[in-house]
RNA sequence: GUGGGUGUAGCUCAGCUGGUAGAGCGCCAGGUUGUGAUCCUGGAUGUCGCGGGUUCAAGUCCCGUCACUCACCCCA
């Protein structure tokens, strides 16, 4: 078994817990399907360029967290570290913008990042993605943000918060950036933080270390330096969110690690998790399409972490996806009864009843134990003695009550007993 | 990449200053030659993470290594 373990930073999702994983994933995506978003499936790996140009060379994700490899044809490929860039690549490649806009799409799947694992942070994780492409309308920003909030509410989550801000656009952000760099250079920062300030000065604002935060009290903020049009856009987004009944927390120091974000930017944080508290995040990315060689089209979207959302669901003690799978269980004694059991289970399943039976050599006691564990409410017991009389026993596991049923009536009787 | 904590049965863990490995739960079987969830009895499973060192003797002490875990960084 040496080495035959899940790779570092990955984990298996096993029954019965896997039922909760499915419930989270399906609840989050059901919300998008109902909102008129179309499903899109893109490969789990792309040409490396899609991410280096899309996500941005200077980001941590691209510079040190990608699983990049060369295939046998000499191509450089990368396991996707997030879904948006690949979805945008597909959007451009198939000219989906040559139709009615916006194009609203969703997807769900694996993403990969080479990071040091930690609570809620893994090298393989699952994201639900939602994107609305081709129209720059604040109402669309609000719709996307609201869909995210509603997805979490659908699961019953309450202990989470929406952090919201605007990162400006191509005209006002460079000006602000200069202002911020000027401010940061006067501070007493360690070497690594200085380097970070050069690559992406905004990120220094988000530093959690108290000795850094203490120096940032009167640092200039992007929201105070938005251009008129960007400010108007942000005001409109907030107005629409209010109309949609969504509440949020202004987070002027919120920074996201992907280069493509502009204007509206947001993060969903849950308070029951550890340091990795972001269960989802997103924003507008008006420069992404052009960066990938497509037309100059805008976009807004979010990514929600299914694994982290599951942790949040568990942190709140929510009871989802735990319903028993089996309704009827058949316990045969002897070879002849075995044939009847297999036949009956097949018949019940054909009719939509969740049915199961025992396999392997087990005594009656062991078989009943298996029946109990299956969660079945009704158990059919049939042995040689019954067969000789042409009957079987039907037991209600909740009450312990047992009735004798003629073999001929067995299927309809069980069918009726387990309900619709 | 940096720092802290932890590795003993399938799971949760005990094992004092070194003396040759245990409990609870779970699993299997019997009690009941045809009845689960309760009760009683019995049973199986460990390269004590791995490698080296000290010692008559190492789960226990020392060194290294790997894994897990938490935090920084980053982010879903």
Image (cartoon, coloured by chain):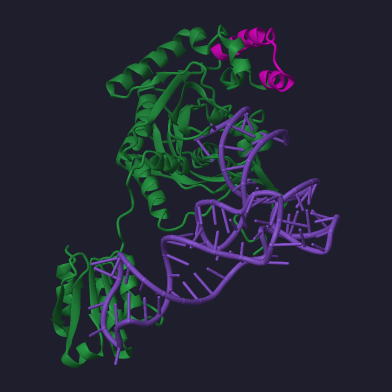
Chain colours: A green, B purple
Q: Residue at x 23, y 76 (%)?
A: A380
Q: Residue at x 38, y 45 (%)?
A: A24
**Residue A379 appears at what percent x and percent y?**
24, 73
Q: Is residue A7 visible?
A: no
Which contiguous range is marked in magenta? A171-198
**Along the horizontal axis of the image, is A375 left or right of A137?**
left
Looking at the image, residue A216 lies above or below residue A135: above
Looking at the image, residue B56 lies above or below residue A112: below
Magenta segment includes A190: yes
Q: Residue at x 16, y 91 (%)?
A: A389
Q: Nearer the viewer, residue A182 or A187?
A: A187
**Along the horizontal axis of the image, is A185 left or right of A335?**
right
Tell me which secondary structure the magenta stretch mostly adopts: helix
Q: Nearer the viewer, residue B59 or A363?
A: B59
**Residue B17 appears at what percent x and percent y?**
71, 50
**Residue A384 appears at what percent x and percent y?**
25, 90
Q: Residue at x 42, y 54 (%)?
A: A18
**Residue A367 appears at what percent x and percent y?**
33, 76
Looking at the image, residue A354 lies above or below residue B4: below
When asked about the image quadrant of residue A354, the answer is bottom left
**Along the horizontal axis of the image, is A59 left or right of A275?**
right
When asked about the image quadrant of residue A333, the answer is bottom left
* Quarter containing the N terminus of chain A: bottom right
Q: Residue furthest bottom?
A: A388
* Quarter containing the C terminus of chain A: bottom left
Magenta segment includes A78: no
């Amino acid at each position: 078994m040496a080495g035959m373990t899940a790779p570092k930073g990955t984990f298996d999702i096993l029954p019965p817990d896997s039922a909760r994983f499915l419930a989270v994933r399906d609840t989050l995506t059901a919300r998008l399907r109902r909102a008129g978003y179309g499903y899109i499936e893109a490969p789990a790996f792309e040409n490396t360029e899609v991410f280096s140009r899309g996500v941005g060379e200077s980001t941590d994700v691209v510079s040190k967290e990608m699983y990049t490899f060369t295939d046998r044809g000499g191509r450089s490929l990368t396991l996707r570290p997030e879904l948006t860039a690949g979805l945008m690549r597909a959007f451009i490649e198939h000219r989906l913008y040559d139709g009615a806009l916006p194009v609203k799409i969703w997807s769900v799947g694996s993403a990969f990042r080479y990071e040091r694992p930690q609570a809620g942070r893994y090298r393989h994780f699952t994201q639900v993605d939602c994107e609305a492409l081709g129209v720059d309308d604040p109402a669309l920003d609000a719709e996307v943000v609201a869909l995210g909030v509603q997805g979490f509410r659908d699961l019953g989550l309450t202990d989470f918060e929406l952090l919201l801000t605007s990162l400006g656009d191509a005209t006002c952000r460079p000006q602000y950036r200069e202002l911020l760099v000027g401010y940061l250079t006067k501070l007493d920062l360690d070497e690594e933080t200085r380097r970070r300030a050069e690559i992406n000065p905004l990120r220094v604002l988000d530093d959690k270390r108290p000795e850094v935060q203490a120096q940032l009290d009167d640092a200039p903020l992007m929201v105070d330096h938005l251009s008129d049009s960007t400010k108007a856009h942000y005001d409109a987004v907030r107005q629409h969110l209010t109309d949609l009944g969504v509440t949020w927390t202004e987070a002027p120091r919120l920074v996201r690690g992907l280069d493509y974000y502009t204007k509206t930017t947001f993060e969903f944080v849950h308070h029951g998790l550890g340091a990795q508290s972001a269960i989802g995040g997103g924003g507008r990315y008006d420069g992404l399409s052009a960066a990938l060689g497509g037309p100059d089209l805008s976009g807004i979207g979010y990514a929600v972490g299914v694994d982290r959302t599951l942790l949040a669901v568990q942190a709140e003690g929510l009871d989802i996806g735990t319903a028993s799978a089996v309704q009827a269980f058949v316990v045969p004694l002897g070879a002849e009864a075995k044939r009847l059991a297999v036949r009956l289970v097949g018949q019940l399943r054909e009719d939509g009843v969740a049915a199961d039976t025992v396999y392997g050599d087990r005594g009656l006691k062991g078989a009943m134990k298996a029946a109990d564990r299956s969660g079945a409410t009704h158990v059919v017991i049939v042995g040689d003695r019954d067969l000789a009389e042409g009957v079987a026993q039907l037991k209600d596991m909740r009450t312990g009550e047992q009735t004798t049923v003629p073999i001929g009536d067995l299927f309809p009787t069980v069918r009726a007993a387990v309900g619709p």
